Amino acid sequence: MILMASVMMTSCIAYRPQVAEMPLIHEKGELQLNGSVGLSAPLGDAYIGTTASYGATDWLAVQAHVNWNGYKGGYGHAAVGAFKAWDHAVLEGYIGYGFGGNKWKNENTGREFTSRYHLPFAQLEFGWAGIANGHIDIGLGVKGGCLFPNLVDRKPATENHPESIVRSTVPVALLEPQFFFRAGGKHLKWTFNFGYSQLWGTGPDREAFAGTNAIYMPFTINMGITYDFNVFAKKGER
């Protein structure tokens, strides 16, 4: 607890894994809606989120995701991709574009930190949907992209020091693996997701957000409910 408090006093959270629901779309017309609550670790950053995914054609899927962590900020993305199903097994690939941010202020010192970023990405997902007589979905995914940040760390002037403003716009490479598990009825399921982020700076030292006190949280878990309308499926399938 002392270590966590010390890190929070000296550093500012610029990014956390963005865990959107992996739908495993099976067919044209399938609509899946998800609502969840999440927590990032190790410093704790709670949020609420929602994901909507839809099978637009026999192979094309679209997705939208947003999450919000109160007054501090949030994230959203739109993605389009392709899917292929073999009985219960599904392979999906998406390309998308996200935008988000975070902010923090120390009321005692007046220090303010803001993080805004754009995130173009590609994501590959594979899993099994509707196994155990339609009651379980399980799978893995991996996202790769480039984070384009705009970080501003402002310290107000004091009697002994002038105002200090540190900015960073150096792009950051991103890799995010994700695991999910859903269980319940054929349409309504409880869902659990676990995501991990690894960031690399593009500067000489390869450190993410180099030159600032900004850090990122590597882990995110969330839980919620997912409803799969599966509107075109034949009766008794999945």
Image (tube, rainbow, N blue to C red):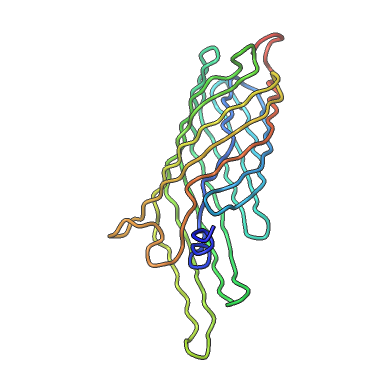
Q: Residue at x 33, y 56 (%)?
A: 202
Direction from residue 46 to residue 139 in the image, left or right: left
Q: Residue furthest top?
A: 236
Residue at 59% of width from left, 35% of height from top? 21
Of the pair 57 and 68, the residue shown nearer to us: 68
- Work out whether 98 lies above or below 82: below
Q: How far from the left and from the top, in percent, is residue 121?
A: 46, 43
Q: Is residue 133 above or below residue 230?
A: above
Q: Can you name the residue that lies furthest to the front here?
A: 2
- From the image, which quarter does the N terminus lie in? bottom right
48 left or right of 81 in image: right
Which residue: 40% across, 50% down?
199
Relative depth, front residue between 162 and 143: 162
**Residue at the extreme left of the image, as rendered:** 204
Residue 106: x and y in percent read: 59, 71
Exactly how many numbered labels are in the figure?
0
What x and y, as percent, mark residue 93?
A: 48, 30
**Where in the figure is residue 152, as x and y percent of width and height?**
50, 69
- The residue lying at 36 percent from left, 51 percent from top is 200
Q: Quadrant of the C terminus?
A: top right
